[in-house]
Amino acid sequence: MITQSALVSFDRLETPFYYYDMDVLRSTVDNFSSTLRKYGITAHYAVKANSNDRILQTISGAGLQAECATGNEISLAIANGFPPEGIFFDGVAKTDREIVNALKAGIQCFNCESIQELEVIDALAGGLGLKADVAIRVNPDIDAHTHKYITTGTEEDKFGISTWAFDDVFAALSRCHNLQFRGIHMHAGSQITDMNVYAMLCKRAAEFEKIFSEHGYDVQILNLGGGLGVDYEKPLENWMPDIEGLCRTISENLPLKPGQTVHIEPGRALVAECGHIISRVIYVKKGLKKQFAILDCGLHTLIRPALYQAVHQVENLSCKAPVEKYDVVGNVCESSDVFAKDLEGGAPHRGDFFAIHSAGAYGQVMNMKYLQRELAPAVYSDDLK
């Protein structure tokens, strides 16, 4: 995905930077769009995965909707072509100001995660003379079998409302006259590649839909959340996420009633594989038993490996042979700032270009100025042609 001509262009650029292969992004988005249409499923892109303007414009241009976790994400999504009437507003801690601005913007739905949130939205909507469309985020109590920091659907997570609180939900909905109930929302976790997890999620959705219907609440929206994973270990070979498998699993396991719609909230699956961090080797340090390739980027450029031991494929773009074993580490004074241990790759030299692949999701959007280093810029394949 990083061509020789692109590599030549890198030589005139300062590192580190985020390199976006726009052909990969467009192919991924187009595949999602066509597959979703085939199955009649609506996708709301999770803006938190990557909020870069050109990324957002490419996704909105393909007709996908948006899922936002903050008021600023809502403003950014609208500015980049996402219609407000297709925006879902998620998050466990929506502030009063964010709720008011979302109401004024005319978003499609608030995905609510607590009884108190329902009451606050009701009061704020009433103060504006508006009705707020809401869905209840139900905790499915499903273990997505991912890292504990990105599992969000078990019974004791801070997210969502568990079944034991349903009576309180129904009571709140009955007394909150400025709310319009639209449906249910679930999210099992992130980086899910086992379709059996989604099959279980669909069955739980059908169970919850039955409970709400029996209590007089018409479920129009069935939102299964996000979480579709990507191949971090072999991204250059398997860069297209299994959206076909996900949509087929939903179609086979979630029967719909007339008027119901199914929604998903993909984030990383759309953008992870189009993005790469390009960095130079500053020093090669040799020890008694191992050697280190020390890059000019660090955990402030890509925090995922340090935060939850995420694996990214790392490649020496400048040298393919001879092959040596070494650790690839960052420039931050933290022992967790490691991108690859015992990498078997081209021998590292000062000045070599390295790529950290699958960095399009939760890379640039989490970039920070730790140690007062400059934020890494974005470079696009379209601009190097």
Image: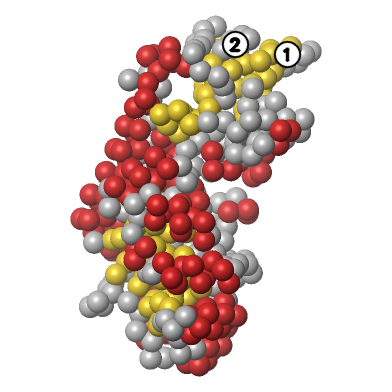
Q: Residue 364's quadrant in the figure?
A: top right
* Residue appearing at x 53%, y 27% in the figure: 17
* Image position of 25 (left or right of 349): left
Residue 358 visible in rendering: no
Whether residues under marks 1 and 2 lie with C-beta atoms below 8 angstroms apart, the answer is no
- Tell which tag, 1 or 2, sits nearer the viewer: 2
* Residue appearing at x 54%, y 16% in the figure: 353
Residue type pointed to by label 2: Gly
- Identify the secondary structure beneath mark 1: strand
* Residue appearing at x 50%, y 64% in the figure: 90
Compared to residue 233, the image places residue 101 above or below, namely below
Q: Position of residue 200 (x, y in %)?
A: 43, 65
Task: Indicate which disc, 1 or 2, sits on the residue closer to the N terminus.
Answer: 1
Q: Position of residue 319 (x, y in %)?
A: 52, 10
Q: Quadrant of the C terminus?
A: top left
Residue type pointed to by label 1: Lys
**Foreground: 301 or 155?**
301
